[in-house]
Amino acid sequence: MPTFLPKTFNVRSKELFYVTRRKTQRTEINCFNCCHFYITYERHFPYGCRAVGFKSRRMPAHEMFLNSGLVCLLFEEKEKKSGV
């Protein structure tokens, strides 16, 4: 075990907890339903978020979760089009 980790730190349980949280996060937020989400049409960075101002290879909400450990707090549901 690396010396920079606390002695009570269990790498295996931390990894399992992370995977469990990531799966839960994916089902809660769908960027396609967010008004800030857009398609960039760039080959290497196809997805973007106007609220945060970045482009990514992954869905923006997933990218935010991987970098901060928090679910996307800027998610806003798109307005439903009526009359169709």
Image (cartoon, rainbow, N blue to C red):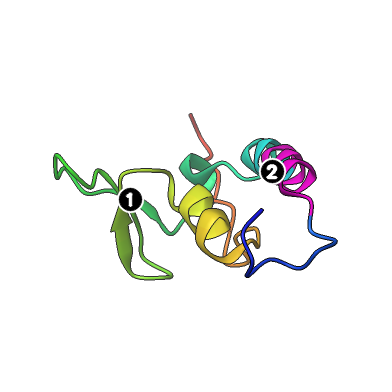
Q: Which residue is mark 1?
A: 38
Question: SS class of the residue under badge 1?
Answer: strand
In the image, 7 versus 38, the foreground residue is: 7
In the image, 79 versus 59, the foreground residue is: 59
Q: Main secondary structure of the magenta part?
A: helix
Q: In the drawing, does residue 7 fall left or right of residue 74?
A: right
In the image, 80 versus 9, the foreground residue is: 9
* Position of residue 19 measured from the top left corner of the image (x, y, whole percent): 68, 38
Dot 1 alpha-carbon crowd within 10 angstroms: few under 14, some 14 to 19, many 20 or more: some
Question: What amino acid is at disc 2?
Answer: Glu
* Position of residue 45 measured from the top left corner of the image (x, y, whole percent): 23, 47
Q: CA distance from mark 2 to mark 1?
A: 31 Å
In the image, 31 versus 64, the foreground residue is: 64
Q: Is residue 40 above or below residue 69?
A: above
Q: Is residue 11 above or below residue 23?
A: below
Q: Which residue is mark 2?
A: 15
* Position of residue 3 measured from the top left corner of the image (x, y, whole percent): 64, 66
Question: What amino acid is at disc 1?
Answer: Tyr
Residue drawn at point x = 55 percent, y = 44 percent: 80
Q: What residue range appears in magenta?
A: 10-20
Q: Is residue 15 magenta?
A: yes
Question: SS class of the residue under badge 2?
Answer: helix
Residue drawn at point x = 48 percent, y = 29 percent: 84
